[in-house]
Amino acid sequence: MSKFDERKYYETLKFILFKATGDLFPDAHVRIENSLNNGIFGKILNIKIPLEIAIEKIKIRMIEIIKENKKIILVCDNIEILKENSQGIKRKDIKRLLDNTGLISMKEYEMDGYKDYFHDELYNNTKKIYLFDIYNYEDGFILKMPKENNPYELPPIIDNKKLSEIFKENSLWNSILDVACVGCLNEKNINGTIEELIRINEVLHNSKLTRIVKEILNNKNIKIVTIAGPTSSGKTTFSKKLRLHLLSERVIPLIISLDNYYKNRLEIPTLENGKKDFESLESLELDLLNSNLNDLLKGKEIYLPVYNFITGEREISKEKIQLNKNGIIVIEGIHGLNEKLLKYIQKTNIYKIYISCLTQLNIDYHNRIYTSDVRKIRRIVRDVLSRNTSAEKTLETWEEVRKGEEKNIFPFQENADIIYDSSLVYELAVLKVFAQKELIKIKPSSSYYKESKRLLKFLDYFLPIETSKIPDDSILKEFIGGSFFYKY
């Protein structure tokens, strides 16, 4: 087998799903919504029989289509021709995208008389699909396929119930605000209603934070709050906003960073490539952390450690600290959801928050936006601004960062007491201008040139939004600058 192309496989598998559904249920509509449970969650609307039975019939028909080795034909990849013919397109989501977007990359494919629209390349026949599964989940389905790191097996079945609830909530709000797809967002940008959408989105963020604070304060046992999430989720801004909310309730937060509990550099575990694994739980002095926390909870004064990243050694702060009688400890770090982190602290004293950018906005009803792409663009923009790191360097380290998340963060997300979605439905339209300036600097000779071109094409879907419209306490300001909480 040649190198497994996960995206091409996924796009082709979706086309087979749409074709099978159309063959069996001509009046049905499939919507691809988000990644979930090690697969893709979607819905089938306008089905007259029980969903579980319908999905089983669709699965059988998909297998038949694959065995029949049907040809997949690229009908048109000229966006101007597609725009000229948009009046004849029945799907409103595609029509709104074509009518409200610039020179995007869209392709019309045909399989045995059935046509659909995609934004990535497909295989030229169905026989290339050799492994998949689809099954009923809640009010929709989960579509599973192999991953690039293991193309011969389907990933294990898991049940992310808490994550599912967040996606449901987001989907409902996007429906209410009429911004389920990019075309809808661009339409609001054109007709001048985008500023109201921004303010509503920011109010939703703040109201969710208010609910979290009330939940914490209503439980008198909670003395420690941990905050964890993958890179570029906005953890630092969230922590700073949480502090303000707690202070407004006359609760004094004591902020503790896990970075100060690193072992001395010589003791930190090493990765296969020889680099120090600062993201592993074993790199932290857990006994010292738990001892410090227990002392603070007992009202004792202690010296906190301070990690010197220049010498690679842990030092002791010069001043003692003590937890206020009306105080609470807030810990931010990637291991905040791991049960082993606070193994000597009573579970009833801990409240765990998982924060991530769980993008619900899709390109159209059949093509979703990858949440990892949004976080990647966030990080590119922030790295240039706050660390003077090039987009090429960010892309170079991205896969290593993702591997760390798969190992140290994602397996524990269901341990959270609550999940906070930091995504903003309008953010890619703001990040676009910043990211384009950096991605375009990557030269054809770079091994990351192809990825930079893919991201540039993706950003073409969004009409830009001015940064002046964004409040200075928005999580987005952590990435583009001008935040109340930062100097840059």
Image (spheres, helix red, strand yellow):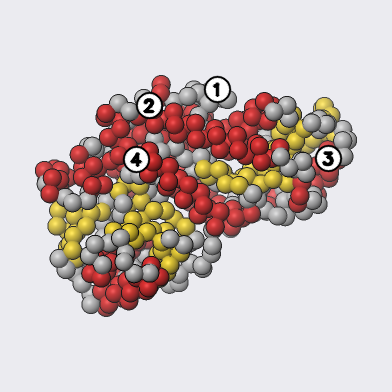
Badge 4 or badge 3: first in the primary sequence: 4
Badge 1 or badge 4: first in the primary sequence: 4
Q: Residue at x 55, y 34 (%)?
A: 207
Q: Secondary structure at mark 4?
A: loop
Confirm or deny contact between disc 3 and disc 1 (CB under 8 A): no
Badge 3 or badge 1: first in the primary sequence: 3
Q: Quadrant of residue 52?
A: bottom left
Q: CA distance from mark 1 to mark 4?
A: 30 Å
Relative to 154, is 270 above or below? above
Q: Which residue is mark 3?
A: 297
Q: Nearer the viewer, residue 461 or 162?
A: 162
Residue count near mark 1 (Cα–Cα under 10 Å), binned few <14, some 14–19, many ≥20: some
Q: Residue at x 32, y 37 (%)?
A: 185
Q: Position of residue 33 (x, y in %)?
A: 39, 53
Mark 2 or 3, which is nearer the eye? 2
Q: Is residue 80 left or right of residue 164?
A: left
Q: Is residue 53 visible?
A: yes
Q: Which residue is mark 4?
A: 178
Q: Which residue is mark 2?
A: 195
Q: Position of residue 264 (x, y in %)?
A: 74, 44
| Badge 1 amino acid | Phe
| Numbered tag placed on residue 484 in the rendering | 1
Q: Is residue 426 left or right of residue 167?
A: left
| Badge 4 amino acid | Asp
Q: Nearer the viewer, residue 133 or 50?
A: 50
